[in-house]
Image (cartoon, rainbow, N blue to C red):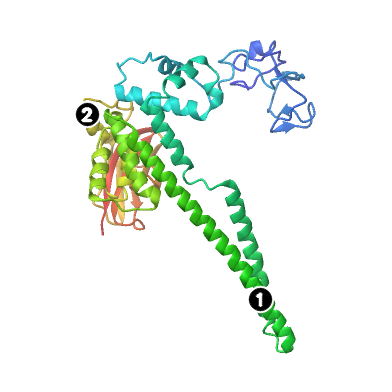
Amino acid sequence: WHTQNPVGAGGFNAIYEDITAANFFPIVVNQSTTVTGASPEAFGSVFPLIPNQPVDWIRAFNIEPNFECLATNACNDLPCNPCDSELDEDIAEGNIQNNPYTSETIWMLQSELYARLNRDSILLNSDSLYQAFYANMQNDNIAQFETINEELLDLYELDATVYTNLQNNNNSVEQLMSQLANKMEQMQDETLSTQQLAALQTEITGLQQNIANLIAYNNTAIELAQSSQTLTTANMEANNDAIVSSETIEVNTQEVNDIYLNTLAEGITEFSTSQENSLFSIANQCPLEGGAAVFMARSMYYLIDRTAHYDDRWLCLQEGIILREQNVDISSNNFNVYPNPANNELTVTYSIEEEETTIFELYDGIGKKLIRSTLDKNDNTIIIDVSNIKNGIYFYKIVSNNKNVKNGKIIISR
């Protein structure tokens, strides 16, 4: 629980980062509550299993909560979920200024905070400030778009009772199929009398009918679910169309929602010319200007053109938005990747220092990692086999000491 293994006894309300203060502030454990990862050797089943913990640093005591931190910065080794921040409070209070945040960025921050509050009642009820923000947003387009997002998440959720029935029916069908196979095998017995064969045939007919009934029930249930989904989609389309949007970020969200609800949500994977043009237009916007709908449009446009590539630095620069360069200690000029187009092999030449850990990674158009190779510090060239990769356009990046130092596009053509 310390940054280094502490030595010595603890005290109530231990501050994990302060070994000296830990002598006076131990962690309090409630003996009546079971803790995951418990050690049966100490305090029954409630003692947390911590290697090298100091003697008496953790003590049993029948109070709640099981663990108590003295201050907000005393238990920050693990990420909190959910948790708020000063930025959240500024968003809720409307104190985010337009510099350095664009109006679109503020919209996205407000939208993200509203979504979190909408899905997390504990966080919502933790502060009157959040409750006021949430209430004020009810008539805003942000709230209406979040309602559609929630309905999209629920669109493919099958009713729990129907799902259970389908599962049970499938299990029953498997059992009946096994019985049917057994009866069919018995029919091959040449020693059976006419009466025995007739009895077996009756049993087989009954099994077949039971199987048919269960399959018919499942098909009907699925058809009803699909009909319900169609009705839900139509209702969502109406709600989306009713939103009055004027800002680019809202117009984009509304347009992408409309295309999705009229195609993929209904199992349609082909787009009209108008839909293709809309997706292309939105996909080629700066995400900081066009919002999250830009990424949604790109993922949908991939179904149309899998070779499409987007240079956000350039797209944003046209809108007067300069994306920050990542600070790196190594120049991209230290690396070369060739030939391009490539056939069966890629050659990477490089110059790196001995203390650097450098990785070459190759991705397809949807971000799936295909190759990961570590560059040897004692060499300056690596040959990468791409013979098993299909023709197409791929993307590589070179990472040194967890920093992205070079990106590029490679065409594989044979």
Image quadrant in which you'd find residue 312? top left
Mark 1 or mark 2, whichever is nearer to me: 1
SS for tag 2? Answer: helix
Left or right, 324 with respect to 159, comes to: left
Query: At which x and y percent is residue 313?
Result: 25, 32
Q: Is residue 176 above or below residue 8?
A: below
- Measured along the vertical axis of the image, is residue 327 above or below residue 299? above
Mark 1–mark 2 contact, CB under 8 Å? no
Please name the residue shown 51% across and 45% down the image. Answer: 157
Q: Nearer the viewer, residue 235 or 91?
A: 235
Location of mark 1 (residue): 204
Residue 226 spot, x, y in % from top left: 46, 52
The residue under label 1 is which amino acid type? Ile
Could you tell me residue 332's position as x and y percent?
A: 28, 34
* Quarter in which the C terminus is drawn: bottom left
Q: Which residue is mark 2?
A: 317
In-front residue for pair 63/337: 63
- When the figure is inspected, residue 329 is found, relative to residue 208, above or below; the finding is above
